[in-house]
Image (tube, grey):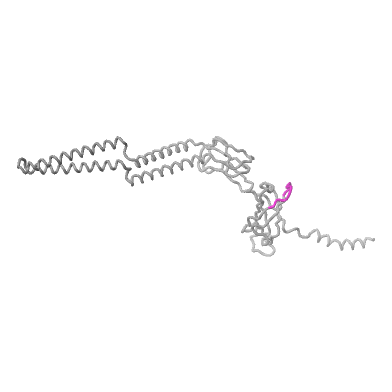
Amino acid sequence: MNLSQLARICAAALPLTLCVACGPARDDAFPGYAEGDYVRLSAPLAGTLTAVHLRRGDQVKAGAPAYVLEQASETAARQEAQSRVGRAEALLADLRKGARSDEVAALVAALREAEAALALSQANLERERKLVADKFISRARLDQSTAALAADRARVEQARARLRSAGTSARSDQVAAAEKEVEAARAQLAQAQWKVDQKAQAVPVGGMVSDVAYRAGEWVPAGAAIVTLLPPANIKARFFIPETELGKIRIGQGAVIACDGCAQPVKARITFISPEAEFTSPLIYSKENRASLVFMVEATPEPGQALLHPGQPLTVRTEPRS
């Protein structure tokens, strides 16, 4: 084969070679990275941090103690509220029950005394009526005895009423007011207990301790995150698809995640598709610059899959729509 024949063969094979090398890659594989939604533990009350039970990198379970802030003021307020509840409940119980036995005995004695005075007044009135009829005393004396009898009768009724009230509880409006006082005292106790509880936090969900922002002895402002957690269920894949592929995916569609060092692909489900484009051109969208539009998509690994690490480079391949 001479040089001219070799040149013709190479010229004929070159377009085919370039066509194979420049052929389009798979359009269902997209680059991305792992992202995590962190859980930040903070207290709504400020205070000095007295103890931290966690360290960065720890794997903790839900319910494990996290940290404790100084609680002296809140504990004292709780004790005060407990005392107020006890006082309100004692007052309510006292209003609901009748008088004590010695008080009842005194009221019975007062009733007997009033009844004896009434009997004496009745007897005196009968004698004076006879004396008035025989004209031994004046009519005015009879009127005085009649008035005294009426007064003694009123004292008897008053003594009987006091004895009846002693056997019953206080008036309904007084009892209702005392019940409201008990409710208010209990609500105040609940508030005080809540403040005490907020100063000693537990881990709300299991995961890895990503960061501990404060150390024991430091002053922690209200609402400041002290411990940051990363639950495994909060790790997801974030990748970007071009505008031309947007219509091919949907929420709930399956995806396969590949990463360096992963023993096997990680199965996932698409859980979010951004409604806005990123890296957009400021110009009017044309066929030429429309290719620069990409949309952020998130896929959450299914339970039991390999654990991803935030920031880890990934390749996500979407599965065919069912």
Q: Position of residue 202 (x, y in %)?
A: 56, 41
Q: Nearer the viewer, residue 141 or 200?
A: 141
Q: Position of residue 69 (x, y in %)?
A: 52, 37
Is 301 a magenta residue?
no
Q: Assign the magenta stretch its main secondary structure.
A: loop
| Residue at the image point whose x is 41% and y is 37% from the top | 83
Q: Which residues are magenta?
A: 259-267
| Residue at the image point whose x is 62% and y is 38% from the top | 55
Q: Quadrant of residue 152?
A: top left
Q: Position of residue 273 (x, y in %)?
A: 63, 57
Task: Say whether residue 140 is left or right of residue 113.
Answer: left
Q: Nearer the viewer, residue 140 or 311?
A: 140
Q: Quadrant of the N terminus?
A: bottom right
Task: Say whether residue 96 is left or right of residue 220.
Answer: left
Q: Quadrant of residue 58?
A: top right
Q: Nearer the viewer, residue 197 or 217?
A: 197
Is 263 a magenta residue?
yes
Task: Say whether residue 77 is left or right of residue 314.
Answer: left
| Residue at the image point whose x is 21% and y is 37% from the top | 113
Task: Say whether residue 98 is left or right of residue 322.
Answer: left
